[in-house]
Image (spheres, grey):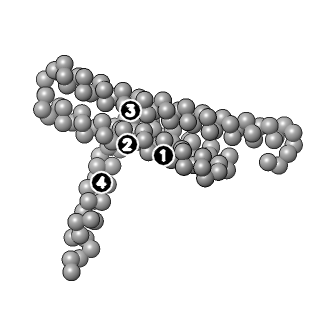
Amino acid sequence: MKPFLGDPAFESFEYAFRGWFHVLQTQRNVWIHSAIAAVVLIVGLWLRLPPRDWAVIVLTAALVFTAEFIIHPSEAVVDLVSPDTHPLAKIGKDVGAAAVLISAIAAILVGLLILASAVMGEVHCSFRGLAC
């Protein structure tokens, strides 16, 4: 029997975490997304969001991070095969950036829909002196 540390499944997690830390170390936008996600987490906990809202928020945040994590290696491969500026390389990078932008806009809309509704409910209860 192989030791746990030599297990290929364990090694795949090791590679995944290396990639995760690499993106965190090199990509400013991932830090921006992380900061926004932390704020949403804090506000969501304060509002005591129901599980369904959390599910939507988690899936939406995962979409944004997945888009970022896909575009980074794609850009690296484009840079590898086309070190000089090339119109097709630019198209590839621009389309990848558009995918991240679309996911970020969707996340903003989801956050506004869920959090604004919950905040308005809290404000309504506060003004009426109710415990909601």
Which quadrant of the figure has residue 121? top right
Q: Which mark is residue 100?
A: 3
Q: Earlier in the sequence, mark 1 or mark 2?
A: 1
In front of the other: label 4 or label 1? 1
Q: CA distance from mark 3 to mark 1?
A: 15 Å
Q: CA distance from mark 3 to mark 4?
A: 20 Å
Q: CA distance from mark 2 to mark 4?
A: 13 Å
> Would residue 125 be visible to someone looking at this image?
yes
Q: Are marks 3 and 1 in contact (CB under 8 Å)?
A: no
What's under tag 3, amino acid-wise?
Answer: Val
Q: Dot 2, crowdedness within 10 Å: few (<14), some or many (≥20)?
A: few
What residue did someone put label 1 on? Answer: 59
Q: Earlier in the sequence, mark 3 or mark 4?
A: 4
Extreme-bottom residue of the structure: 1
Q: CA distance from mark 3 to mark 2?
A: 9 Å
Q: Dot 4, crowdedness within 10 Å: few (<14), some or many (≥20)?
A: few
Q: Earlier in the sequence, mark 2 or mark 4?
A: 4
What's under tag 4, amino acid-wise?
Answer: Ala
What residue did someone put label 2 on? Answer: 66
